[in-house]
Image (tube, rainbow, N blue to C red):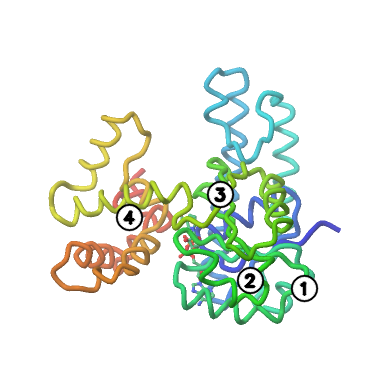
């Protein structure tokens, strides 16, 4: 029987991680907290599965194209140099089967995690909520189960003791649209067992990721140590009424040749995540500060349902396209 992987949380990233596990043959469970969570996660599963399979289908047209090596869905085809139309057709057939057969949704915490090889926590970026969930699961996990967090901004040492298995716990951090942007940053805390760390490196590679090993704890890992200040600077320009999001994006793209600007990236990340990151700063709660204004402006958009690409509208309107 294939190994069981469990994702705690069925949001933007949790869904994508689960789908990659299912695609690569793991028996994949999403633990969700309520019936209404199922109603929110099921459309994401459908939407991201369709996007993954569509990108795989489109990659057939890239075979033999010199740009193909830059554009193919890197997480879904492990060796592009050997890819042919026939091999991609075979991956499509297997991928469709795996995505339809290997995914399960479970509300019962005990049933969700029993006999799990690996559990990945990918819940909202709220420390109290994460601690509550770790404490809910600490006595339900099998002794040998490895536990990882996909947290973007919080350190594993903040949670290690709450998990009840500090030596079997580390961070395994993915990037959005993981079937294309297949980074897996792996970061232990001082108490993570070296063998567990190595097992997580192996697991990441087995779901099509490129394991990127950090030698010590770093808030924001490698990627977000660069990305969060960048996105925050863009939001500060917007909140300070220096320029509108479209102009800020255009400036960045024209001047650097980057394919996306910061507000297009924020729409992909989701405005709730940006808001949660903003709210972690004490200064964001002091009226009159720029950070307070940034939080208020993000909240106004969230309250209107403009939370990003998944909602059809964020800083840009995707329903028009
Ligand atoms: N969005 C990104 O680009 C991105 C990238 C890498 C890592 N991450 C990390 O992934 C994690 C999830 O982010 P996301 O963007 O998927 O968030 P999201 O808001 O899309 O999803 C959060 C999920 O957590 C669930 N949840 C919230 N509170 C809960 C609780 N108390 N009990 C049980 N479930 C609860 C929600 O129902 C939802 O399924 C965060 O730690 C974030 O830092 C996000």
In the rendered view, tell whether residue 217 sits above or below residue 107: above
| Residue occupying the point 53% across, 42% down | 181
Q: CA distance from mark 4 to mark 2?
A: 27 Å
Q: Which sits earlier in the primary sequence, circle 3 or circle 4? A: 3
Q: Badge 3: few (under 14), some or many (20 or more) residues near its Cα, within 10 Å?
A: some
Answer whether residue 140 is visible to the viewer in this image: yes
Of callouts 4 and 2, which one flags the residue occurring earlier in the amino acid sequence? 2
Pointer 2 residue: 31
In depth, the one of 280 and 177 nearer the eye is 280
Q: Residues within 10 Å of mark 2 (few under 14, many from 20)?
A: many
- Which is more N-terminal, label 3 or label 1? 1
Label ID, residue 314: 4
Q: Quadrant of residue 296?
A: bottom left
Cβ atoms at labels 1 and 3 below 8 Å apart: no
Residue picked out by circle 3: 214
At a point 37% along the width and 55% down the height, the residue shown is: 308
| Nearer-the-camera pick, 284 or 312 | 284
Q: Quick one: label 4, few (<14), some, or many (20+) residues within 10 Å?
A: many
């Amino acid at each position: 029987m294939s190994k069981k992987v469990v994702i705690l949380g069925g949001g933007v990233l949790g869904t994508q991680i689960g789908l990659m596990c299912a695609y690569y043959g793991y028996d994949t469970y999403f633990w969700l907290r309520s019936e209404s969570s199922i109603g929110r996660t099921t459309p994401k599963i459908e939407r991201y599965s369709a996007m993954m399979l569509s990108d795989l289908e489109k990659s057939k047209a890239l075979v033999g194209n010199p740009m193909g090596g830059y554009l193919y869905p890197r997480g879904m085809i492990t060796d592009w140099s050997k890819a042919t139309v026939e091999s991609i057709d075979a991956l499509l057939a297997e991928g469709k089967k795996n995505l339809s057969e290997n995914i399960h949704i479970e509300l019962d915490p005990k049933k969700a995690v029993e006999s799990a090889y690996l559990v990945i926590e990918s819940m909202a970026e709220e420390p109290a909520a994460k601690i509550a969930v770790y404490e809910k699961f600490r006595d339900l996990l099998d002794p040998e189960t490895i536990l990882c967090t996909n947290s973007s901004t919080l350190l594993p040492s903040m949670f290690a003791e709450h998990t009840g298995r500090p030596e079997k716990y580390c961070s395994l951090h993915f990037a959005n649209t993981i079937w294309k942007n297949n980074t897996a940053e792996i970061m232990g805390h001082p108490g993570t067992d070296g063998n567990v760390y190595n097992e997580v490196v192996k697991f990441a590679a087995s779901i099509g990721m490129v394991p990127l090993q950090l030698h010590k704890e770093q808030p924001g890992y490698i990627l977000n140590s660069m990305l969060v200040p960048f996105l925050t600077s863009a939001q500060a320009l917007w909140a300070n009424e220096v320029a509108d999001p479209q102009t800020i994006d255009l400036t960045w793209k024209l001047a650097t040749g980057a394919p996306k600007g910061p507000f297009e990236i924020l729409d992909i990340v989701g405005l709730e995540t940006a808001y949660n990151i903003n709210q972690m700063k004490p200064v964001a709660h002091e009226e009159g500060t720029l950070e307070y204004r940034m939080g208020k402006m993000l909240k106004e958009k969230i309250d209107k349902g403009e939370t990003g690409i998944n909602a059809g509208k964020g800083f840009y309107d995707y329903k028009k396209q």
